[in-house]
Amino acid sequence: MPNPFEDERSAYLVLTNAEHQYSLWPATLGVPAGWSVDFGPADRKSSLDHIETHWLDMRPKSAQNGE
């Protein structure tokens, strides 16, 4: 059985949390508490492209305040 986080044939969601962090998540799994769907379901490449385009600062939101 392929790893659900690395299966090119599966559909994925892009999740975000309150700290504006992103996660690639298999669409077949339930969304964990504290996360919400930002994009998808879509293929893995489109989902990774979405993350790359929108997650410009890898620091948690709380670490970005007061720069």
Image (cartoon, grey):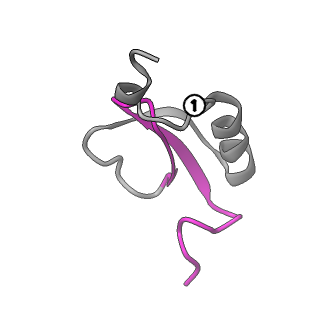
Give the residues in magenta: 1-27
Rendering quarter of residue 37: top left
Above/below status of 24 relative to 21: below
Q: Which residue is drawn at 33% across and 29% down?
A: 18
Q: Position of residue 55 (x, y in %)?
A: 60, 33
Q: Mark 1 points at which residue?
A: 57
Q: Position of residue 52 (x, y in %)?
A: 69, 38
Image quarter in which the N terminus is found: bottom right
Few, some or many residues within 10 Å of mark 1 (<14, 14–19, 20+): few
Name, please, the residue furthest toward the bottom: 1
Q: Where is residue 15 in the image (x, y as percent from the top left)?
A: 46, 40
- On the picture, is 63 further left or further right than 55? left
Name, please, the residue furthest toward the top: 66
Q: Where is residue 27 in the image (x, y as percent from the top left)?
A: 50, 52
Q: Which residue is drawn at 46% across and 57% down?
A: 28
Give yes or no for residue 32 being in the magenta stretch: no
Give yes or no for residue 18 being in the magenta stretch: yes
* Dot 1: element: loop
Q: Residue at x 25, y 43 (%)?
A: 33
- On the picture, is 30 further left or further right than 51? left
- Decide which of 28, 64 is in the foreground and name it: 64
- Decide which of 56, 25 is in the foreground and name it: 56
Q: Give the residue type at disc 1.
A: Asp
Q: Residue at x 39, y 29 (%)?
A: 63
Name, please, the residue furthest toward the front: 67
Count every numbered label the image shows and give the total: 1
Rendering quarter of residue 57: top right
